[in-house]
Amino acid sequence: MKKLIPVLLVFLSSFSFANSVLIPMDKAQTNHLKAYGLAYMLLKDDQDVEWLLNYRGGSFRVAYSKAVEKECRLRAVSYEVISDGESQQITAQIGRTDVDMEVIKLHTAAKIAVYTPSKISASEFENTDAVLLVLKYAEIPFEIIYDEEILKGDLPKYDWLHLHHEDFTGQFGRNMRRVSVSDVKAQEALASRLGYKKVSQMKLAVAKSIKEFCAGGGFLFAMCSGAETFDIALAAEGVDIVENLDGDGADPQAQSKLNFEKTFAFYNFKLQTDDYEGMIFSDINSSAGGRYWNRDASEYFSLFQFSAKWDVIPSMLVQNHENLIREFFGQTTAFNKTTVKPEVLVMGTSNRADRYIYGEVGKGQWTFYGGHDPEGRGGSHRMPTDLNLYPNSPGYRLILNNILFPSAKKKKRKT
């Protein structure tokens, strides 16, 4: 009988006193993208989640329950059941002053809105929106909104807003290969119904509303041309920069009239006012001006490493199991370094351009991420990526870091 005691003690130490689930986010994780969806689901169910910054790739730790363990298995997410003692050892390790790690408590699931023209037209180009793809794959709920919802004041209902392919300059993407005739007509009809003479005027009003949303404490995540044209529209307020698409010509002095104090991220950029088949808006785009970009993305950009204890916000936004991430193409591939404002925080860069940047406005924050699809290659804008083939994508992880970031805000107390 005595020989059974050690075995029994091992059994008890493994299960009876186990009270945490560790979801590793290093290379031991079988599905990084689904792990974020699991964390979001737990937050939505009013369970606190701890984000262990810089610990095993930015792992998550939650209270143990059979339901959590079952959900991990259903989502094919790697997990480890750890005892109270093991959890305390991890906390002690992270708490050491000589270790660049931190425990961040996530409190509530952000309410997510995705801005997309699919609300009013076919907009087939939106089928390859990287954020829509990863939200669906990770099983994170979201709502689709567009100009009408924003202009009637719906943005305060949400914590997090995504922009991707949109052209806020009113030039319909500057290329009819991207926007169909029916898409253009839908935009024009919407502008008319909402009381605007031009689509460009409606888009400016939307951009200004988004800016107010951020200043009031909202979080904006923009990719590709959504990031570039958002700032161009703000800088060009009161200036006609649209040539031959809205019934009149552009202001010949438009370039000199741009106001860069109104923008979030970019300044001193030069507009592209002709060659609509080129799909270039300005030299914010690192592929503008004839600069060639490798469509096969054989190059890499690197993530900056921030102090988890002192630079918590950027540390959350760069959590990853890889430091070097393969480049990827887009209508706005990445950001010309000379056009990025000095006060903007660069989080991902290469010798060629800045890829991943962050800033604050008022009480809110924004992140701009260049490129179309982190796992896309040449021509990927026509075919949506199957994320079942890329469950550990470090490029897509950056998107999901942004989705969890607002959860670090404490819940408002009821009075």
Image: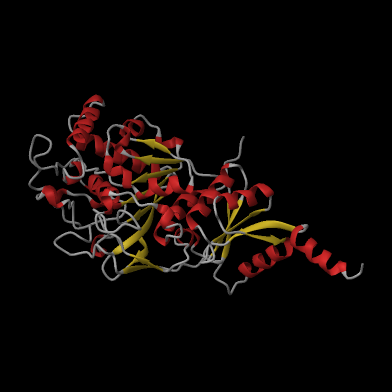
Residue 236 spot, x, y in % from top left: 20, 45
> From this viewpoint, is residue 273 visible?
no
Relative to 134, is 199 on the left or the right? left
For the N terminus, the image quarter is: bottom right
158 vs 181, nearest the viewer: 181
Residue 20 spot, x, y in % from top left: 68, 57
Residue 333 spot, x, y in % from top left: 26, 58
Colour scheme in the image?
A: secondary structure
For the C terminus, the image quarter is: top right
Residue lying furthest right in this view?
1
Residue lying furthest bottom in this view?
98
Residue 217 quadrant: top left
Name the residue located 88 percent from the left edge and 70 percent from the top edge.
Answer: 3
Residue 369 spot, x, y in % from top left: 34, 56
Relative to 220, is 44 on the left or the right? right
Looking at the image, is 256 positioned above or below residue 153? below
243 vs 294, nearest the viewer: 294
> From this viewpoint, is residue 257 visible?
yes
Residue 283 quadrant: bottom left
Name the residue located 18 percent from the left edge and 54 percent from the top edge.
Answer: 282
Looking at the image, is 30 positioned above or below residue 264? below
Looking at the image, is 235 positioned above or below residue 180? below
Name the residue located 58 percent from the left edge and 75 percent from the top edge.
Answer: 98
What is the count of numbered marks? 0
Name the residue located 35 percent from the left edge and 60 percent from the top edge.
Answer: 356
Residue 119 quadrant: top left
